[in-house]
Amino acid sequence: MAVDGHHAASVAEAIAELELDCQIVRNRDALMVLPAGVTKGSGLDAVLLEANLSPHNTLAVGDAENDLSMFGIAELGVAVPNAVSSVLRHADLILDDPDGTGIAALLNNSYVTGARRFCPRRRWVDIGTFDDRSPAQIPGSQGRILVTGPPGSGKSYLVGLMAERWIEAHYCVLVIDPEGDHVQLGQLHGVRVIAGRDHLPEPSELVNSLDPRTSVVVDMSGLAETTKKDYVHRLRSTAEASREQRGFPHWVIYDEAHLLGTEEEAPWARRGGYVLCSFAPASLPAGEIDKSDVILALSDESGADMSSVRRATVRFGAAPPRAFAIAERQTEHVRHRRKYADVRLPSERRFYFHDTDGQFIRPAATMEEFRSAINHLDQRALQYHLTRGDFSRWLGSTIADKGFARQVAAWEDEVSARHAADVERVRNQLARAIEGRYLPESDADGSATTADALPRPS
């Protein structure tokens, strides 16, 4: 119901007298009396859901108080210059011309056509803390981000953190994961993991299954190395075509992005919303470093000490880099999970079991062999390695799984008194942890997160 604003007191009195669950929202000089929870924003959200469209591909134009709720839903809130003061304060963009003239100009604006990228500051996400305790933030949408650093420096950890933040903000994220580093993101609400030991769905089938309010991790670790590069190229082209047509995925993350090669098949000049992560930036498509809005760099020292806080630097455009402490992840990061489960490590990186006299017993070249040895090792030999801290040191330095290494180090400390019961308890804990972290049942039987059936949006 709409009434003149002069009747505000009478309307409030009537609502109280009738004991109604109503809200009063101003529309300049008028009052809107609506059921509780019903706003222009809730209506916009319902329409977008019905149309399978994303609020993150939406802009809302307003001039009055009852338009503010739409600003909370839409990615971009736009005000005409003759709007009420509260709308002007909350707007991300204020038009030059009033009323219909301004809106007509907006429809041809570079923001609408896609020629110009803009992420409102309120949509930026936190990924850590600068040394002055201010939040380290990156754009929530439309950014061109490069993540670089040597192997084992924590690049995939940081990429996974960014994915978590965007997923929390209800962006549609497509993670192209050649090494299986990001399957744990599947623990988050609205995230599917698509995997297959020998094959994955055709890129067109996979992209057509995307929904603007869900995200997908494409675990390519089961593919032969010779087929990964071709699949990444085909998936990239298909994902970009979907973004041109439907507006999502909002982010495409290319871990191990050097698989793209240096030759650029399709121009990305106008496009944002992608992350390129690689230890070899010179192997990326030509010019991508110069095109990047944000460059995140890690070093060998980014998290070398198991007890230290992970650190990186961020650089925006031509500004100097700033160091920051990387925030903690929601999901657990397991680096190269399938690689360490299935692929035999070179001799210099294997774990070598010894007896109490220091005599060599057996090596472990995979996590399966390591788990098996833990289960069957003589108790005295097991205690020998536990009290020396050998397991945590190997997991932290060679496997670069610093989180797991910290956990194992705590278990090693528990048996420093050389109690047999503690040794057996830690044996069981360690074996179960390896199974759950590197050798899940889904890998053994292929029953989970396979590409056999892929639901399509209705």
Image (cartoon, helix red, strand yellow):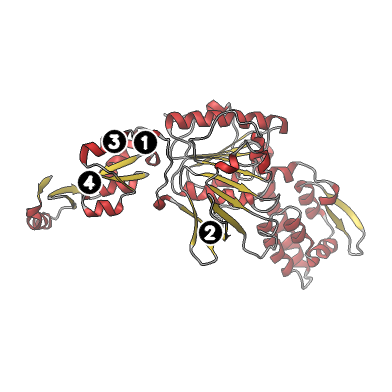
Tell me the amino acid under the disc marked 3.
Ala
| Dot 2 amino acid type | Gly
- What distance separates the C-alpha of mark 4 from that of mark 3? 16 Å
Circle nearer the viewer, 4 or 3: 3
Quote the CA–CA distance across marks 1 and 2: 31 Å
Q: Which residue is mark 2?
A: 128
Q: Secondary structure at mark 3?
A: helix
Q: CA distance from mark 2 to mark 4?
A: 36 Å
Q: Nearer the viewer, residue 158 or 360?
A: 158
Q: Would you identify the image quadrant in which residue 194 lies?
A: top right
Mark 2 secondary-structure assignment: strand
Q: Which mark is residue 105?
A: 3
Residue labelled with disc 4? 63
Q: Residues within 10 Å of mark 3 (few under 14, many from 20)?
A: few
The percent position of residue 29, horizontal first and vertical second, equals 12, 50
Q: Which mark is residue 112?
A: 1
Residue 280 position in % (x across, y down): 69, 43
